[in-house]
Image (cartoon, rainbow, N blue to C red):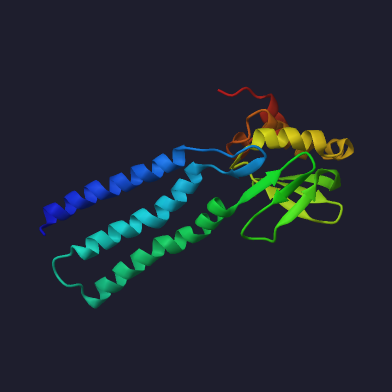
Amino acid sequence: MDQDNVNAIIAGVVPALVLTLLGFASRGAAGPGQLRYSRVWRGFSLFLAIVPPLGVLALAIFQKKPFEPSELATVIALAVFFPALSAPLLLEFLRVRHDYDDVRLAFRSPWTRHRDVRWADVASLRWRKMAKWLDLRTRDGVVVHISPMLVGLRPFADVALARIPPEVLEAHGEGRDVLLVMASGKGSDLLTSPLPPAQILITPRR
């Protein structure tokens, strides 16, 4: 097979796969009572794990001349590099899912043990500006991290604001402001804006 045919195959297959992943990424959202990453993030992690290695393998398969040992080692390294790089992203974006109702939050993450937190037991809220997540800590010291990258933040924040003890919300104003930002539909601004949550809350979007 000549190089023109190889290029044609790669030019046809790779974009088709990309479009398939993007189509997967564009559909769906968190269901009622759920927090999860959007299909955009899940599609991105799948893209990173699949498409670059396929491109490397396609070039290797249709290579006309035999590889030198050093070249073969480079091809193998490149084929392994992207799946290895994307493995933590796949775990994070595909396996994280938190379920909640009017009584409790069920926190599910591949990095920590599963935890069930009752709203009535939440004793403090802390906004981690550098890490970009909200810590909910119970009286027993159990901590869960809520990222603004998750979808379903608005109904989640509505429930949290209604069910977390009022004295806790009052005592931890910045954490309360983060929940109010999420409830207002500006949760993504917590990731991108340099303003504190209280300012994000009162600043109109452009």
Q: Residue at x 87, y 52 (%)?
A: 139
Q: Is residue 130 visible?
A: no
Q: Residue at x 85, y 56 (%)?
A: 140
Q: Residue furthest left?
A: 2
Residue in the foreground of this view, choosing between 131 and 121: 121
Q: Residue furthest right?
A: 167
Seen in the picture, residue 169 relative to 21 is either above or below; the reply is above
Q: Residue at x 72, y 51 (%)?
A: 144
- Say whether residue 189 is left or right of residue 1: right
Q: Is residue 140 visible?
A: yes
Find residue 42 and report its horizontal and vertical position in percent: 49, 48
Q: Residue at x 13, y 66 (%)?
A: 64
- Say whether residue 68 is left or right of residue 26: left
> How many numbered marks are there?
0
Find residue 142 and report its horizontal and vertical position in percent: 79, 56
Q: Quadrant of residue 103?
A: top right
Find residue 43 and report its horizontal and vertical position in percent: 45, 47
Seen in the picture, residue 68 relative to 136 is either above or below; the reply is below
Q: Quadrant of residue 162?
A: top right
Find residue 6 and report its horizontal and vertical position in percent: 17, 55
User: Which quadrant would the N terminus be assigned to in this image?
Assistant: bottom left
- Say whether residue 24 is left or right of residue 155: left
User: Which quadrant would the C terminus be assigned to in this image?
Assistant: top right
